[in-house]
């Protein structure tokens, strides 16, 4: 397919940021802004060289749900590493350039590259598009980029007025202001001056009621956050069998401050997500279900207010897959007789739950991903292979949500 770049999208200088992309026409939420089908560079990372097609970036999407804690693709935060890369490139290429020129080029490539992801937003490799690289960062972005194979699509997250700049987030915007600033400085070498950062707000921190704010001082919040990040960092580096204990230690730090430090606040939300991933990696499906339910019920609706936000939709899909792995019977037979019995003891109407979650994903795809996306195709394949149930009414679904809330507490506290 040819690139789709409307004439209304144009490049212009942004004071202190270099070039940026703008739109001369208003863009409604959930619309395709532009699409690049053949980026300048699009390559798998070392971990996926054997499992991902170099040309189309299709991987085996039918394999068992599995993830790990240490596989995030991160840019180097050490100048020494960049210098060594530049020296190696200069030596290997044999070009008639001085080291400073090659270093400048290497740095530009690192800073302007993007992480290629699959339909589930798992990192697969690196992409460099000269056009898309003009998108500037905001901690409250109005756009998001989605990959379908090698094709890069930029979609709107909110109403963008005529003359408005198109922005994406370079980082996880659910982090606190301190962590966002640190990450941007380490990986992209700039200080963010967006409204969130100027006001020193963490994600949705301004929504905490004043009585709850009074229960914790700013210093106490900062201390908790630093200690939670420290213990979580130890978990990342620890052997697999020790990761869960360290993450549970980190989670326990916040329990005495439940009201003032809700589950959706960083780093509690990140710790819950890590515990979910580790449980998946270990095949502890009931624990994974508990953490995924807590994220679905308490974290994602706050961190991603749009019901069709791509990240929220993908994580709902992961919840569906965990339910299947934990014992729901598909058309081909029970996935696990052992866990099927375990699930049934909770009295939850699992066919209704799956139908409701599938309905939410179906409703989110047109705006969050587009019907032509690889995510839409993967979800359709999944849905067709799982026993169907009529879409439940609102009252019936609310009753099951109450059961799911209790189930999450029983499974993981």
Image (spheres, rainbow, N blue to C red):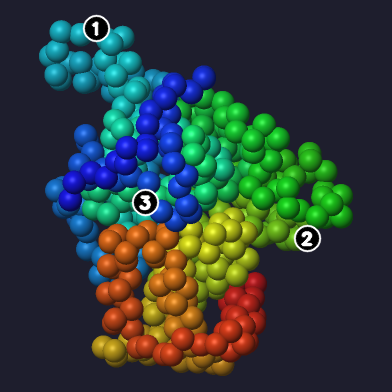
Specify which label sits upstream in the sequence, 3 or 2. 3
Instruction: Give residue 280's quadrant in the image.
Output: bottom left
Specify which label sits upstream in the sequence, 2 or 1. 1
Q: Please state which of residues 253 and 23 is positioned toward the viewer in this rendering.
A: 23
Q: Please state which of residues 162 and 135 is positioned toward the viewer in this rendering.
A: 162
Tell me the CA gap for discs 3 and 2.
39 Å
Residue contact between numbered discs 3 and 1, judged by CB atoms under 8 Å: no
Q: Please name the residue shown 31% across and 16% down the image.
A: 103
Residue 100 is situated, as x and y percent measured from the top left of the image, at 31, 9
In the figure, 406 relative to 196: above or below?
Answer: below
Tell me the CA gap for discs 2 and 1.
58 Å
- SS class, disc 2: loop
Q: Please name the residue shown 44% across and 41% down the image.
A: 25
Q: How many marks?
A: 3
Q: Quadrant of the C terminus?
A: bottom right
Q: Please name the residue shown 21% across and 52% down the image.
A: 57
Residue contact between numbered discs 2 and 1, judged by CB atoms under 8 Å: no
Disc 1 crowd, CA 10 A, few/some/many (<14, 14-19, 20+): few
- SS class, disc 1: loop
What numbered label is drawn on residue 98? 1
Q: Please state which of residues 211 and 146 is positioned toward the viewer in this rendering.
A: 146
Disc 3 crowd, CA 10 A, few/some/many (<14, 14-19, 20+): many
Residue 243 is situated, as x and y percent measured from the top left of the image, at 50, 56
Specify which label sits upstream in the sequence, 3 or 1. 3
Tell me the CA gap for discs 3 and 1.
42 Å
What numbered label is drawn on residue 259? 2
In the figure, 243 relative to 33: above or below?
Answer: below
Q: Please name the residue shown 35% across and 22% down the image.
A: 107
Residue 242 is situated, as x and y percent measured from the top left of the image, at 50, 57
Q: Please state which of residues 46 and 17 is positioned toward the viewer in this rendering.
A: 17
| Mark 3 or 2, closer to the camera | 3
What numbered label is drawn on residue 32? 3
């Amino acid at each position: 397919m040819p690139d789709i770049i409307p004439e209304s999208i144009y490049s212009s200088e942004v004071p202190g940021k270099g070039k940026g992309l703008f739109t001369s026409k208003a863009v409604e939420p959930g619309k395709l802004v532009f699409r690049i089908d053949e980026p300048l560079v699009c390559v798998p990372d070392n971990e996926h060289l054997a499992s991902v097609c170099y040309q189309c970036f299709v991987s085996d999407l039918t394999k068992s749900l599995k993830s790990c804690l240490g596989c995030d693709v991160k840019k180097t935060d050490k100048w020494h590493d960049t210098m060594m890369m530049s020296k190696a490139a200069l030596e290997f290429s044999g070009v008639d350039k001085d080291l400073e020129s090659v270093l400048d080029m290497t740095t530009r490539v690192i800073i302007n590259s993007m992480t290629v992801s699959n339909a589930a937003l798992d990192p697969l490799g690196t992409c460099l598009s000269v056009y898309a690289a003009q998108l500037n960062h905001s901690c409250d972005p109005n756009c998001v980029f989605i990959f379908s194979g090698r094709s890069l699509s930029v979609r709107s997250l909110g109403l963008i007025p005529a003359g408005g700049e198109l922005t994406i987030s370079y980082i996880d915007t659910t982090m606190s202001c301190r962590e966002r600033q640190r990450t941007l400085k380490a990986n992209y070498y700039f200080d963010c001056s967006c409204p969130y950062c100027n006001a020193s707000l963490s994600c949705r921190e301004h929504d905490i009621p004043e009585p709850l704010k009074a229960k914790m001082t700013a210093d106490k919040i900062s201390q908790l956050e630093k200690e939670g990040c420290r213990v979580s960092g130890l978990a990342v580096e620890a052997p697999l069998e020790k990761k869960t204990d360290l993450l549970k230690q980190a989670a326990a730090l916040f329990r005495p401050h439940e009201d003032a430090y809700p589950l959706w606040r960083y780093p509690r939300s990140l710790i819950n997500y890590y515990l979910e991933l580790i449980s998946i990696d270990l095949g502890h499906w009931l624990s994974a279900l508990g953490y995924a339910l807590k994220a679905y019920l308490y974290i994602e609706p706050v961190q991603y207010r749009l019901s069709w936000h791509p990240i929220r939709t993908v994580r709902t899909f992961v919840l569906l897959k965990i339910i299947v792995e934990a014992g729901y019977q598909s058309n081909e037979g029970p996935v696990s007789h052992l866990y099927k019995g375990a699930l049934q003891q909770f009295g939850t109407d699992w066919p209704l739950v799956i139908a409701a979650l599938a309905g939410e994903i179906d409703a989110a795809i047109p705006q969050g991903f587009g019907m032509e996306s690889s995510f839409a195709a993967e979800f359709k394949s999944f849905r067709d292979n799982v026993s169907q149930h009529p879409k439940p009414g609102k009252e019936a679904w609310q009753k099951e949500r109450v059961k799911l809330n209790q189930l999450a507490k029983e499974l993981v506290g």
